Image (cartoon, rainbow, N blue to C red):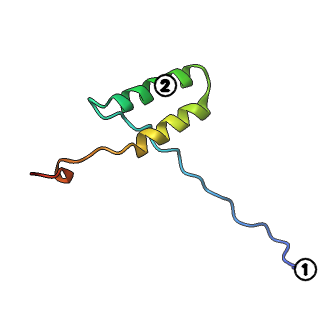
Amino acid sequence: MSDNTTMTPPVYLSLPPNAPKPVEGCGVCAALAKQRTKAEANGDFSTAADCSIELRNHPHRRATDRKTA
């Protein structure tokens, strides 16, 4: 058993990241953004956070990723 009687230092948390923006012209992104807005309006912040995570992780191909024939 330890004889240490001092408190550990405080934990510092950062602010949550800004909500990701949907990519223009992407139907999946638009649907997720709409679902997130509806969830926030209903106070369902768990679903809103899930939508933001999906938006952030949704893959989009870059022009440099395209294969040329």
Q: Which residue is mark 2?
A: 35
Q: Residue furthest front?
A: 69
The residue drawn where x is 65% and y is 58% is 11
Does 48 appear above or below 34?
Answer: below
Quadrant the N terminus occupies: bottom right
The quadrant holding residue 45 is top right
The residue drawn where x is 37% and y is 32% is 29
| The one of 45 and 65 positioned closer to us in this rendering | 65
Q: Are marks 1 and 2 in contact (CB under 8 Å)?
A: no
Q: How far is mark 1 from mark 2, CA to CA? A: 52 Å
The residue drawn where x is 17% and y is 53% is 64
| The one of 61 and 16 positioned closer to us in this rendering | 61
The picture places residue 16, in percent across and down from the top left corner, at 52, 44
Instruction: Decide: few, some or many residues near mark 1? Use Cα within 10 Å; few <14, some 14-19, many ≥20.
Output: few
Instruction: Report the side of 5 relative to 37 (left or right).
Output: right
Name the residue type under label 1. Met
**Mark 1 vs mark 2: which is more N-terminal?**
1
Between tags 1 and 2, which lies in front?
2
Name the residue type under label 2. Gln
The picture places residue 2, in percent across and down from the top left corner, at 87, 79
Give SS at disc 2.
helix
Give SS at disc 1.
loop
The picture places residue 39, in percent across and down from the top left corner, at 55, 24
Q: Which residue is mark 1?
A: 1
Q: Residue furthest left?
A: 69
